[in-house]
Image (spheres, grey):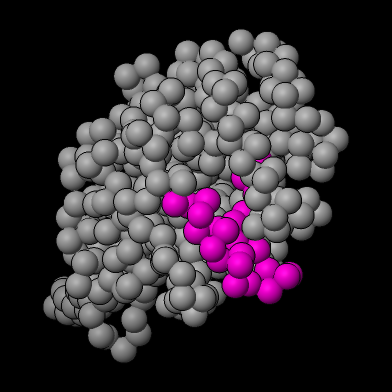
Amino acid sequence: MKKRVETKIVSILFFALVIMVTLSACSSGKETGTLINDGLTDSSKGQKPVKLRIVWWGSQTRHEPTLKALELYTKKNPHVTFDPEFSGNDGYADKLATQAASKNAPDIFQLDLKYFAEYASRNQLAELSTGIRLQNIDVALLETGKYRNKQYAIPLGNNATAMVYNKNVVDKLGIKPPSNDWTWEEYFQFGIDAKAKLADNKYALLDSTSDYDMYTHYQLSKGQGAPITDDGKFNINKETWLEFINKYAALRAKGVVPPAEITATDIEYDAKLDLLHNDKVLIRRSLGAIFTGYDSLKPGVYQLVKVPKGGQAGGFLKPSMFWAVSADTKHAEEATKFIDWFINDEEAADILTTTRGVPVSSTILEHLRPQLKNADMQQVELNKNVAPDAQKYSQGAKGWSNYTEKDYKDIGEQVIFGKISPEAAYDVLIKKAKDYE
């Protein structure tokens, strides 16, 4: 009887051992007939699912790689998924500002430098001082994302101001092409020479009467500083501004720039409404980081050059844009991890390339260099050409974005349509500015 009991006990122990070995093999992922796979990487096991809202602007050449990068991140970190939102540049800033004001901003959002100070000063950004590897990023570039000595935004690309022109058409016209050393006088003469050979319904230059950024380049090149100072003071030089505005009035009369009704239809970066894209003009102000979008629509057609100069250079270097994290996010740690991966991971870089400008990480740029295409290399060369005499870039004065983005444009369009004289428009600019000082 005792022997039978002992035999039974041994049998039970034996089968228990078999079961333990089987379960152990399954959990380790080894083949044992049935494979148990929880679908998680080691770093994701046991972590709660997180969905990050993320928003950006740009062309399809930016949207599609970004979506692929998000897919790759989720594949590597299955507990993290994304709720992406993206659009063209038009209306993006207003929508984001409304969301932030109502404490409903996305967890991660693309932010332009011109709005950074306003978001930071309103405590709408989470601090990003830890968790992101920044050692391979230029210190001066990182400084643009700091507010009161704390890092609140991470630059995503090295960027330079530029002019982009239709090289194919210029070559066919047989006129002197733009160069990296040209002056404003040469720029305006280029427009006159081109128009002399263009059809009546084609124009050479874009009318920059209502373009605050283009006028900023002009005034900087005169050595007169930014139109609005860093401390929020009106600094549009009357003589210089009237010179600029009257120059475009003369060009408008000669048909070198489009008439008012055509100028008003222009939407930058829009594949159908951008006047450079639809062949209404030959050249426009742009940024290096935007160039791949232009090139994707008409490969090999466009060329980048520096902004014209006066007594000084008119252009500058700047971060193309930032990733920022909402101060109201409930997932700050996961958002930070994603940004670190986005700027420092080689696989991410292989997907994103230069869709947000030249990569900020020096090691990532070196990794990408062998695979960069002509449009990418034009960005790299542009940065190299702009750097030696670049103007110091201003982050913009807190609270002035509505003035520079909307009021200035509205007043300029009144001039273009002949509703107000340049002299009267300057007085309106001064009057409007008093609301912001």
Left or right of 247? Residue 392 is: left
Near-viewer residue (144 or 242): 242
Quadrant placement of the N terminus: bottom left
**Residue 372 showing in the rendered view:** yes
Left or right of 75? Residue 367 is: left
Whether 200 is drawn above or below 403: the answer is below
Near-viewer residue (59 or 261): 261
Q: Is residue 140 magenta?
A: no
Q: Where in the figure is residue 404, as x and y percent of width and height?
A: 62, 30
The residue range painted magenta reads: 186-209
Residue drawn at (47%, 25%), measured in percent from left and top?
A: 226
**Residue 402 showing in the rendered view:** no
Left or right of 342? Residue 138 is: left
Query: Quick one: which residue is furthest to the right in this view?
Result: 419
Q: How many marks?
A: 0
Whether 168 is drawn above or below 138: the answer is below
Q: Where in the figure is residue 26, as x and y percent of width and height?
A: 28, 76
Q: Where in the figure is residue 310, as x and y percent of width and height?
A: 39, 37
Quadrant placement of the C terminus: top right
Residue 25 picture quarter: bottom left
Whether 21 is drawn above or below 248: the answer is below
Left or right of 199? Residue 233 is: left
Q: Where in the figure is residue 139, as x and y percent of width and height?
A: 22, 34
Residue drawn at (28%, 71%), measured in percent from left and top?
A: 372
Residue drawn at (72%, 24%), measured in percent from left and top?
A: 423
Residue drawn at (65%, 50%), measured in percent from left and top?
A: 251
